[in-house]
Amino acid sequence: MRISLDPEQCYGSGDCVHRAPSVFTKVDGLGAVIPGREHDVDAPRVREAAEGCPSAAITITRADTEEARG
């Protein structure tokens, strides 16, 4: 599984950073996945961050290419 965050969809609420700071950060005011943490789907609160993203910018892609959007 892989975590991605669409910077064009993100409006910078920072919810992801507050929910899962070990996986998400802010770059130029927008959310971003910390390099090297793209596969930390099982990290505490990552799914919660995806589901709670107010702009639905976080995507968790499964190995079978099925997508689950937050």
Image (cartoon, rainbow, N blue to C red):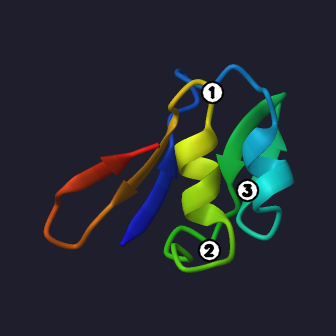
CB-based contact (under 8 Å), mark 3 and mark 1:
no
Q: Tell me the residue at 50%/31% (across/down).
A: 56
Q: Tell me the residue at 54%/21% (across/down).
A: 8
The image shows residue 9, relative to residue 56, as above or below, that is: above
Secondary structure at badge 1 equals loop
Foreground tag (1 vs 2)? 1
Per the image, the residue denoted by label 1 is 54
Question: Mark 2 and mark 3: span between their CA atoms?
Answer: 11 Å
Q: Tell me the residue at 83%/62% (across/down).
A: 21
Decide which of 60, 33 is in the foreground and name it. 60
Left or right placement of residue 27 versus residue 69 in this view: right
Amino acid at circle 3? Phe
The circle on residue 36 is 2
CB-based contact (under 8 Å), mark 2 and mark 3:
no
**How busy is the neighbourhood of tag 3: few (under 14 within 10 Å), some, or many (20 plus)?**
many
CB-based contact (under 8 Å), mark 1 and mark 2:
no
Q: Position of residue 9 (x, y in %)?
A: 53, 22
